[in-house]
Amino acid sequence: MAWLALKPFALAAWRVLTIMIPIPLALIVAVGIWVHFDKSSAVRKAVDKAVTELVAGAEIDALEAQLAAEKTARAFMEGKAASLAEANQRFEDARIAAERANEGLSDDLEELRSKVPGTAVDQPLFDRLRNR
């Protein structure tokens, strides 16, 4: 009995579905055919080529900008390296000069140590100190 009550509704639904389904299917088939033939069209190929050239041009521009930035950074670093080398050379020269001065002072110190302690003060100075 329930079937008899639903029969008019089922018939109406069947008619709607048989009318509605072919429309979307035909639309899907038409879009598929258009996409297939559009891939092989000359206009599509020209557009794809233009897009490829634009992308390649943008990549080349980006790489050129990166190269210019790296050249600038390299020039800066080379300048810093030259300054550092010059500073190192000045420091080395100062170290060598200080080492030579130290050797001279060491020689003077050794000369003073080699003197006999009794001759460090001469007799007139000793006499003057004793009178005070």
Image (cartoon, grey):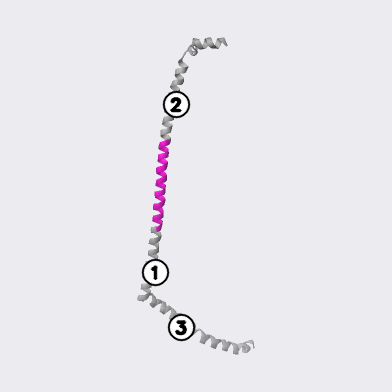
Mark nearer the viewer, 1 or 3: 1
Within-10-Å neighbours for mark 2: few <14, some 14–19, many 20+: few
Q: Residue furthest left?
A: 42
x and y percentages locating residue 43 in the rendered image: 36, 75
Foreground mark, 3 or 2?
Answer: 2
Image point (54%, 88%), residue name: 15
Q: Percent position (x, y) of residue 123?
A: 49, 10
Q: Secondary structure at mark 2?
A: helix
- In the rendered structure, the answer to whether residue 7 lies left or right of residue 123 reads right
The residue where tag 2 is placed is: 102
The type of residue carrying mark 2 is Asn
Relative height, residue 103 to residue 68 (above, below) = above
Q: Which residue corresponds to mark 3?
A: 26
Mark 1 or 2 closer to N-term?
1
The residue that label 1 is drawn on is 51
- In space, the residues marked 1 and 2 are separated at their CA atoms by 75 Å
